[in-house]
Image (cartoon, rainbow, N blue to C red):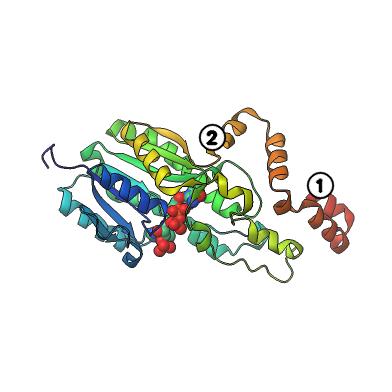
Amino acid sequence: MASNEPKSALITGCSDDGIGSALAIAFQKRGYTVFACLRNPKKATSLSALPNVTITTLDVTSPPSIAAAEEVVRTRTGGRLDVLINNAGQTFSAPLLDSDLDAGRKLFEVNFWGAIAMVQAFAPMLVKAKGVVVNISSMGAIVNYPYIGLSASSKAALSLASETLKLELQPLGVRTITLMAGMVKTKIHDNVPEVALPENSYYQPVEDKVKATTAVEGNMVKWQTPVQQFADEVVEDILKGSEGLVYKGGMSSVLRWSKMLLPTWMMVGILETLHSELLAKHCLGTWTQSKCGSWCARRSFQ
Ligand SMILES: NC(=O)c1ccc[n+]([C@@H]2O[C@H](COP(=O)([O-])OP(=O)(O)OC[C@H]3O[C@@H](n4cnc5c(N)ncnc54)[C@H](OP(=O)(O)O)[C@@H]3O)[C@@H](O)[C@H]2O)c1
């Protein structure tokens, strides 16, 4: 492809009102040829009329689907890709003791393995274009917080792989950004599967708190960054040549610096204070004491 051809960006998980869709709009505004990928193209209504945006069906957990998307991009760009954004992601909330392991494995398939598979499939085009990979991780990856253990772990795994990838792709001329996303106003929480705790769960008395973990309510709403603002800021960072860990979105700076400067016990204390209702420590501790004896309850919950 001649060097005056428009640059290209592929973004996964571009359903309406989400980060992926907003990133697609941000790149389209900057003159990029955009491959807006998603599982269900009917969910791309905000993108379908935009020039230079190709809506591409893609499930990041399906190798044939990835291969088909790779062929679309290769044919259209002559085998180059300037920007790959691994944005597709899912979340769920449940105590680790009660988490359905198959559901957890599926979560890792999307959040972790899907991103790695995409990088492997598109590496030749990224190397040819001396492009950039952006992996959308989460501040949840660095803050231990109850009832989102599997989602957070999948993002922590992605962050570490992404930072490793940075070192492995640098010699090939490809940049890698690990985007530590804070709170962004999207519908992600509407997409969280309903929590159903087993009858014998230790957490039955606080089931409502578990369910509320991934809800954004009350004061928290004001911490969310509007999705298009978030996407525009991310694209600015990509275009100015950032590399490695980049922090964007509501509360990301506060959490980043708190994590760096404060001892862990103080971080946990602050989170407990902010969300003491959700942690429900004393309530759960009291209930557990009555069920299995005070020693185990004190050891576990005090
Ligand atoms: N919003 C936040 O506050 C926040 C904070 C930290 C990190 N993040 C991360 O940002 C990314 C985007 O989230 P969002 O807030 O924009 O949520 P969202 O609107 O729910 O977007 C998630 C996207 O991922 C897609 N997806 C799920 N499974 C997939 C699969 N197997 N293959 C391909 N696509 C798949 C979804 O498709 P369907 O519509 O078909 O389900 C949807 O397009 C996620 O990785 C999320 O973890 C978000």
Q: Return the mark for residue 302.
A: 1
Q: How many marks?
A: 2
Q: As drawn, which residue projects farthest toward the bottom?
A: 199
Q: Nearer the viewer, residue 22 or 290?
A: 22
Up/down of 170 relative to 110, above or below = above
Element under disc 1: loop
N-term-proximal mark, 1 vs 2: 2
**Residue marked by disc 2:** 253
Looking at the rendering, which quadrant does residue 64 occupy? bottom left
Relative to 13, say whether 228 is above or below. above
Amino acid at dot 2: Ser
Label 1: how many residues lie within 10 Å, few (<14), some (14-19) or many (20+)? few
Callout 2 secondary element: helix
Q: Position of residue 236 (x, y in %)?
A: 35, 36
**Marks 1/2: CA distance?**
30 Å
- Residue sitting at x 61%, y 52%: 149
- Tell me if the residue at label 1 has its CB under 8 Å from ligand 1: no
